[in-house]
Image (tube, helix red, strand yellow):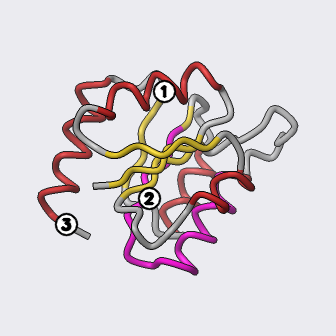
Amino acid sequence: MKVLIVDDIQDYLEALGRALSGDYEVILAASLEEAKARFSNEIDLALVDVRLSESDRSNRDGLALLEWIRSVSPNTPVVMMTAYSDADAIRLAAELGATDFLKKPIQISALKALTASLKRGGR
């Protein structure tokens, strides 16, 4: 199973990658553009931060990526992550087809349980 993790905070990105790398093939991306370049139909799950840069004051880059993934690979599960309590972003992510939502800081045990359940359920 290939997992794409997208987060602009390098330490967080690497920590999530390390947490999943023993069980999955992990692909890391630190921006919207990098995620699009690294995405392929072989991705089985995308973990996407809602806010992908400090300059993204509207907190919409991650949602734009979710929408893009839905357009190129509608069956790929996308789990959104956020450190903010932005009800509008959560609602919009659900409307755009997010599979689930994780609140930061993410508990690794919860992340592993979620990825395992998605792996068992397939795409």
Residue 89 in the image: above or below residue 113 = below
Q: Does residue 3 appear to the left or right of 29 in the view shown?
A: left
Identity of the residue drawn at 24% across and 44% down: 114
Please name the amino acid that badge 1 sits on.
Answer: Lys
- Residue behind mark 3: 122
For marks 3 and 2 on the same chain, the one whose residue lies earlier in the sequence:
2
Q: Nearer the viewer, mark 3 or mark 2?
A: 3
Q: How many other residues sit within 10 Å of disc 2, few (<14), some (14-19) or many (≥20)?
A: many
User: Could you tell me the amino acid type at mark 3?
Assistant: Gly
Residue that numbered label 2 is attached to? 78
**x then y, percent, for residue 97:** 46, 69
For the residues labelled 3 and 1, say whether their Cβ atoms are less than 8 Å apart. no
Per the model, the C-alpha gap separating discs 3 and 1 is 25 Å
> Seen in the image, is 40 located left or right of residue 64?
left
The verdict on residue 120 being magenta is: no
Amino acid residing under circle 2: Val
Residue 82's x, y, as percent? Answer: 55, 36
Above or below, 12 against 56 in this view is above
Q: Position of residue 83 (x, y in %)?
A: 57, 29
Q: CA distance from mark 3 to mark 2?
A: 13 Å
Span highlighted in magenta in the image: 62-81
Circle number at residue 104? 1
The residue that appears at 57% across and 80% down in the rendered structure is 71
